[in-house]
Amino acid sequence: MTTASKITLVRVAFIPLYMVLMYLSGGAAGLMMWLSLAIFMIASLTDYIDGYIARKYNQVSDFGKFLDPLADKLLTIAAMVMFCEWGIFPAWALMIVLTREFAVTGLRLVAVGKGTVIAAGQSGKFKTASTMIGLCVMMAVAAMMGIGAIAWLDWVIVAVIVGTTVYSGVEYFIQNWNCLWD
């Protein structure tokens, strides 16, 4: 296993810790929310670090191409689920994100069955980065003022997440449409 893949596994390992801290925070301003944000930010930074190491040291692997986007999905969806539970991330927006993730994963599985690995595209990377940054902003506001303290900002972040999610999902299917047909 490559160093890049090990770093990605660390990101996956942070997710349960993040979820426990978020749950313990109860959405209230304070230490637990700050710790949640710190863990989320560290985990998010590993996304950049593992990609950098994989490219710089020629550690790009099929396992990494599979695991890296899965780790991103699990981390960001964990945050969205907590925000959904607290009423600041609408269930319909979460459903759009989940639908895109399942659809793209399904497309990747079909492609793998045909001997092709679909790596993350630029729009998918932008979606992931903007989602992670947006979720960090939501957590930072919650850590300072409590969950949902700036409702309009939460809605802007949700709109950005949904917009980049839909755009990147459509792009994946347009660019890889041939994988669906024999």
Image: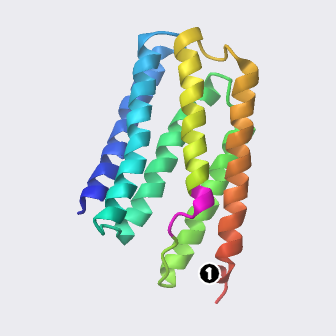
Mark 1: secondary structure: helix
Residue 154, percent from left and from top: 69, 26
Residue 163, percent from left and from top: 74, 47
Residue at position x 66%, y 17% in the image: 148
- Where's the C terminus, which quadrant? bottom right
Dividing the picture into quarters, in which one does residue 161 lie? top right
User: In this rendering, does residue 28 appear at all?
Assistant: no
Q: Is residue 115 left or right of residue 94?
A: left
Residue 171, percent from left and from top: 69, 65
Q: Mark 1 = which residue?
A: 179
- Residue furthest out toward the front: 56
Residue at position x 65%, y 80% in the image: 180
Q: 10 Å neighbourhood of mark 1: few (<14), some, or many (≥20)?
A: some
**On screen, 109 above or below 138?**
below
- Where's the N terminus, which quadrant? bottom left
Foreground residue, 163 or 106?
A: 163
Q: Is residue 65 magenta?
A: no
Dividing the picture into quarters, in which one does residue 63 lie? bottom left
Residue 147, percent from left and from top: 61, 16
Magenta residue span: 119-124
Residue at position x 53%, y 33% in the image: 79
Q: Is residue 149 left or right of residue 129?
A: right
